[in-house]
Amino acid sequence: MDETDTDPELDAMSSVLAKLSALEDKEMQARVLAWVAARLGVGATTLPAIAVQGRESKGSAREGTITTVAARLNVKSCRDLLVAAATHLSLYQGKEKFSRADWVACAKDAKQWKVDYSVQTATAIGRMLNAGFVNETAKDVFSVQDEELRNIEAKL
């Protein structure tokens, strides 16, 4: 890359960092970031997910199967397996949102899947939705809360 070729993303990051660094007060920096995120229609809760997507597109996605994730999370129930599947879809496949069909299919791919989980799936998903583990962003389309992903990631 010669001097005339620049990466617009790096240029923007550099510029934003320089401007925010000039604001010595952390609260001021936070207000500016929140304002910019609001103006661009990017919620603060989606920023980490967007960053994960960007990293994945550049080839640094996590490697591992749903069976590995389920084993590391010590899955013992249908709900546990659905947590592992949602984690796998979000962190390993880089999906910010996923359909109910993809979610259940991912869970069924795990060696830990039991046939009787089929009748428990709808109830477990409903309870996870009510508990705030996932959000339903559209009909049968879900996303995992960023804080939940961070908590689970610490266990992996």
Image: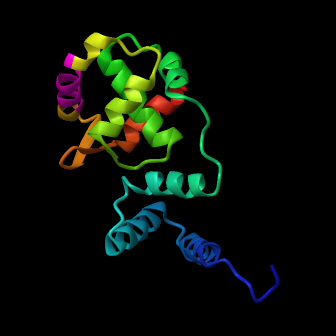
Q: Assign the magenta stretch its main secondary structure.
A: helix
Type of colouring:
rainbow
Residue 43 placement (x, y as % from top left): 34, 60
Quarter of the image with the N terminus is bottom right
Residue 79 placement (x, y as % from top left): 30, 20
Left or right of 128 on screen, residue 37? right
Left or right of 60 on screen, residue 76? left
**Residue 147 vertical placement versus 44 (above, below):** above
> Which residue appears at 17% of the width and 32% of the height?
130
Quarter of the image with the C terminus is top right
Left or right of 45 on screen, residue 62? right
How many callouts does the rendering have? 0
Residue 114 placement (x, y as % from top left): 35, 12
- Whether residue 127 appears in magenta in the rendering, the answer is yes
* Extreme-right residue of the structure: 2
The quadrant in which residue 32 appears is bottom left
> Which residue appears at 17% of the width and 23% of the height?
123
The residue lying toward the viewer, choosing from 117 and 44, is: 117
The quadrant in which residue 62 appears is top right
The residue lying toward the viewer, choosing from 38 and 75, is: 75
Left or right of 136 on screen, residue 149? right
Residue 74 placement (x, y as % from top left): 47, 13
- Whether residue 94 appears in magenta in the rendering, the answer is no
Q: Which residues are magenta?
A: 119-128
The residue lying toward the viewer, choosing from 99 and 12, is: 99
The quadrant in which residue 27 appears is bottom left
